[in-house]
Amino acid sequence: MPNELRELYLQTRATDQWVKPRRWIIAVSVFIVLAFFLPWTQTVATEGNLVFDDPMDRMMPLAMAEDGRLSSWQVREGDQVRKGDTLALLEETKTEYMDPNVLSNTELGRDAKSDAVVGYQSKIIALDEQILQAQRAMPLQIMAAWRKVSADSAKYQAAKLQSLEAERRLLTSPSL
């Protein structure tokens, strides 16, 4: 028996010599496959001149204190500017684009929101009243449930007694 165990041990040790290189090969293969999925960014350095188109020909996001339409640029890229220089001219938005009823529409919207607030407040009051009524009715419902349980218990006891009485009659009656 000990010789058989020793042979079995030696056989398993012989295969362990192949397991370690196999594990390394698998690990390296997995690493190479995963490396293909990593992002690959290449940067090329070069010299040259940067050329921009006319600023009036392209869209540019601007943050301004006043609304309006950009009519012209007063400076070009590369110009020297000082504090207070005019960079661009804004024209006022045409009056036909403006809403003449903006004040009345704003007031209507404000009134509608106020009415909605009043409606929600009345809904809160109604729901609070429903909660109070449910809390008042709860003890009555509990008492009704206890009465039903006791009535059902009495019916059960009566049915049990009837069953026992019927069993007794069946046992004492002369058989046919």
Image (cartoon, helix red, strand yellow):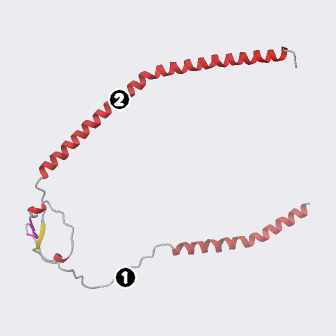
Q: Which mark is residue 44?
A: 1
Q: Residue 26's image quarter?
A: bottom right
- How many labels, in total? 2
Please report whichever mark, 2 or 1, sits nearer to the chain's N-terminal start.
1
Q: Residue at x 35, y 29 (%)?
A: 128
Task: Judge by depth and name the residue closer to the eye, 20 or 50.
Answer: 50
Cα gap from disc 2 to disc 1, whole angstroms: 70 Å
Q: Residues within 10 Å of mark 2 (few under 14, many from 20)?
A: few
Q: Residue 150's image quarter?
A: top right
Task: Judge by depth and name the residue closer to the eye, 171 or 119.
Answer: 171
Left or right, 41 with reference to 107:
right
Q: Residue at x 79, y 71 (%)?
A: 14
Say if 120 sits above or below 5 in the image. Answer: above
What residue occupies the far front of the structure in this picture? Answer: 176
What residue occupies the far right of the structure in this picture? Answer: 1
Q: Residues within 10 Å of mark 1 (few under 14, many from 20)?
A: few
Q: Which residue is mark 2?
A: 128
Q: Nearer the viewer, mark 2 or mark 1?
A: 2
Q: Is residue 66 magenta?
A: no
Left or right, 7 with reference to 123:
right
Type of the residue with mark 2: Asp
* Magenta stretch prevailing secondary structure: strand
Quadrant in which the C terminus appears: top right
Q: Residue 25 location, x and y as percent? A: 65, 74
Q: Residue 142 location, x and y as percent? A: 51, 21
Q: Residue 24 location, x and y as percent? A: 65, 72
Type of the residue with mark 1: Val
Q: Residue at x 12, y 59 (%)?
A: 98
Q: Which residues are magenta?
A: 86-91
Q: Is residue 87 magenta?
A: yes
